[in-house]
Image (tube, rainbow, N blue to C red):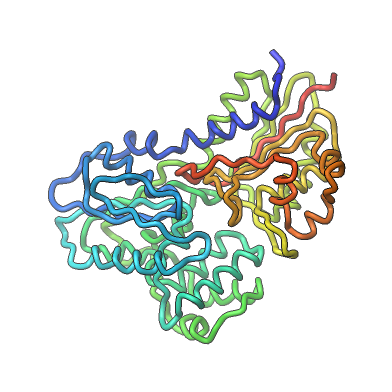
Amino acid sequence: MPIQDPDSFLRRLFDIAVEVADPMAVIPRVLPEKPDGRVVVIGAGKASARMAEAVESVWGPCEGLVITRYGYGRPCEGIEIVEAAHPVPDEAGLVATSRMLHRLQGLGEGDFVLSLISGGASALLVQPAGDITLAEKQAVNAALLASGAPIDKMNILRKHLSRVKGGQLAAAAYPAKMLSLMISDVPGDDMAFIGSGPTVGDATTAADARGIIEKWKIEIPASVDAVLSGETGVVAPGDERLSRADNRVIAAPSQSLAAAVKEAVAAGCQVHLLGDDIEGEARDVAAEHAKAALSARGAKPVLLLSGGELTVTRRGDGVGGPNAEYALALAKALDGAEGIYAIACDTDGVDGAAEVAGAVVTPRTLARALELGGDPAEALARNDAHSFFARLEDQVVPGPTLTNVNDFRAILVLPSA
């Protein structure tokens, strides 16, 4: 049976990808029995409050503190949920992180710490190293976000400017036993980069962090220079303080894409998985995917699926994000090609700093924009993709999804009439 409504079909695929990664569905399957003795639950990230809610649905009320993004809080009976800023950290995150570290002080070998980490933890766990102030940390973080640096490079620098990332959270809990459950939002699901790896050792050095500053031309204050001039607090993988920490990825982009594949095949599509760990400049990846879509038309519907985390080098003064910019660049490259539709969204519901997950593209996207007085080329030049799609009412705005397994992109190529 032909796909009658391509827009609704693509949106359904996105919704399925999000549902599969819902902590309320995942946590009960992987959570062990609650240990005897003292149990402390900590965590950070866009999905962490939902993860805490899921933990208490199994274990009952627990002691603990979890930090999530504003608007992403969930009701918990015992675990305290603190909301703070993302992607640029704020005072609420700073105070909450200090309180979290205080909760870990004095734990013994018989105590147990459950750590709940998801994407977003890098900005929400805030405890600057050395004499770096919050304002200085905010400025460096904002410069990183605008630089176009890949997320793994951003996180290396973030670790070395922190007292909590790069294994330092696990070290603070030692000698207590720790189990860290993670929802991955990084290409390749490398646990050292999920939320900047607060419970995972890291072999990078201050020199590596300084190299990132130089390559992406990040301006730094004297306090950051001072921290990177010596040894930072990042914990090496073989450190004794990590010996009682067990880290596990419980949800990942590959699982969400697999669920979308199953749905698409059931709808009669031939599916090409382009990869769940794609990185690169959003507009460049979009150009490559447009070429693939234009050459993919066959006798049955074809779906091109991809995940990963794209970046945007900020060139203009517009409002945009990697998924919206990908969608806009894709629309330009497709140039109104008949029968090709697409969706590009972040599974956490936030694309860049906007409360928008992403956008949909149709064969009429460019024509409609021109009819409404929009200029696709100018919007792309100004990094103003969110404004572009807002005018068309083609944004995807799911609200807080309470999970985060990174970008979801699908291009549907219908057969020729």
For residue 51, what is the image quadrant? top left
For residue 162, what is the image quadrant? bottom left
Identified at 33% across, 40% down, the residue is: 54
Compared to residue 208, the image places residue 63 above or below, namely above
- The residue closer to the viewer here, 189 or 361, is 361
The N terminus, quarter of image: top right
Identified at 21% across, 39% down, the residue is: 33
Residue 358: x, y in percent?
64, 45
The C terminus, quarter of image: top right
In the image, is 167 to the left or to the right of 132?
left
Residue placed furthest toward the top: 1
Residue 88: x, y in percent?
52, 65
Compared to residue 45, the image places residue 209 above or below, namely below
For residue 142, what is the image quadrant? bottom right
- The residue closer to the viewer here, 152 or 334, is 334
Compared to residue 384, the image places residue 210 above or below, namely below
Identified at 86% across, 44% down, the residue is: 370
Residue 191: x, y in percent?
44, 53
Compared to residue 6, the image places residue 277 above or below, namely below
Residue 44: x, y in percent?
39, 56
How many numbered marks does the figure carry? 0
- The residue closer to the viewer here, 412 or 276, is 412
Confirm whether residue 266 shows in the render. yes
In the image, is 338 to the left or to the right of 102?
right
Confirm whether residue 240 shows in the render. no
Identified at 85% across, 47% down, the residue is: 373
